[in-house]
Image (tube, coloured by chain):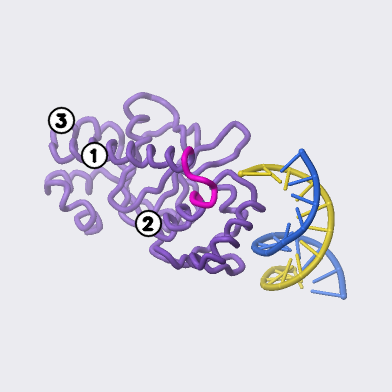
Chain colours: A purple, B blue, C yellow
Amino acid sequence: MNQLTINFGYLFEEALIEEINQIGTYKEFVSDTTIIEIGDYIKSMPLLLNGAIKILREDEHGDELVLYYLEKGDTCAMTLSCCMGQTKSKIRAVAETDVELIMLPKEKMADWLSTYKTWQSYILQSYHHRMDELLDAVDTIAFLKMDERLFKYLKDKAMVTHNDVLQVTHKEISEDLHTSRVVVSRLLKKLENEHKITLFRNSIKVLEL
DNA sequence: ACATTAAGTGATT
DNA sequence: AATCACTTAATGT
């Protein structure tokens, strides 16, 4: 399993890679699978080898809101805080693309914090990075108008899937952004008139990246 | 041919 | 920006 060395070799020393290889369990998820559900107890943390994961928040009525995406080399900050305390997940994680990852039991990650300096800085950096992404998400929701949010959403999605043609319906977008389908349709039409995207049935091509 | 789902649009709040 | 009501277009059975 060389995947690990490819994605994390520059981060971790060999001994740590070796331990991860031995202890971690390799898993795959196909696109659109829910990996972590709200309320789940977290007993292991993931290291993303390939693909992208969408992190969502949900309100009491089941309405969703996309927070950010995880990409290869990332880990989920939520699981970190959940593994420390014994709390439930407050977010949902859905595979945006097909995903390959390694699950690490939570007991080890605490041990490694003291044994491996590279592990320690990786965890701390992950936290820092997630915090930035979260602030970015807050800014986006609080300060950007819907049309700008929408365009950013499309660009982000194109980015993580490495594909400028997005396979989504207006309805799905409206759910991710927590707005109505009608609004999304109107704004998409506007973006198309501005030549930023082109619309098709069930897909959208992003022109300005 | 008919039903279903996706998308476009005017009018109203 | 949300909702309603309605139309049109594409797709599935």
Residue B8, image x, y percentages = 68, 64
Give the mark, 1 or 2, whose residue is nearer the N terminus.
2
The amino acid type of the residue labelled 1 equals Gln
Residue A105 is inside the magenta segment? no
Please determine if labels 3 and 1 lie on a single subunit: yes
- Where residue A98 is drawn, which disc sits there? none
Which span is picked out in magenta? A142-149
Marked residue chain, label 1: A
Label 2: how many Cα within 10 Å (few below 14, some 14–19, many 20+):
many
Quadrant of the image occupied by residue A103 = top left
Q: Quadrant of the C terminus of chain A?
A: bottom left
**Disc 3 versus disc 1: nearer the observer:** 1
Judged from this view, the residue extending furthest toward the top is A85
Please determine if labels 3 and 2 lie on a single subunit: yes
Please determine if labels 1 and 2 lie on a single subunit: yes
The amino acid type of the residue labelled 3 equals Ser
Give the mark, 3 or 1, whose residue is nearer the N terminus.
3
Please indicate whether residue A191 sits to the left or right of residue A136 in the image: right
Residue for badge 1: A125
Q: Are marks 3 and 1 in contact (CB under 8 Å)?
A: no
Position above or below: A154 against A59: below
Q: Residue at x 41, y 26 (%)?
A: A87
- Spatial CA span between label 3 and label 2: 30 Å
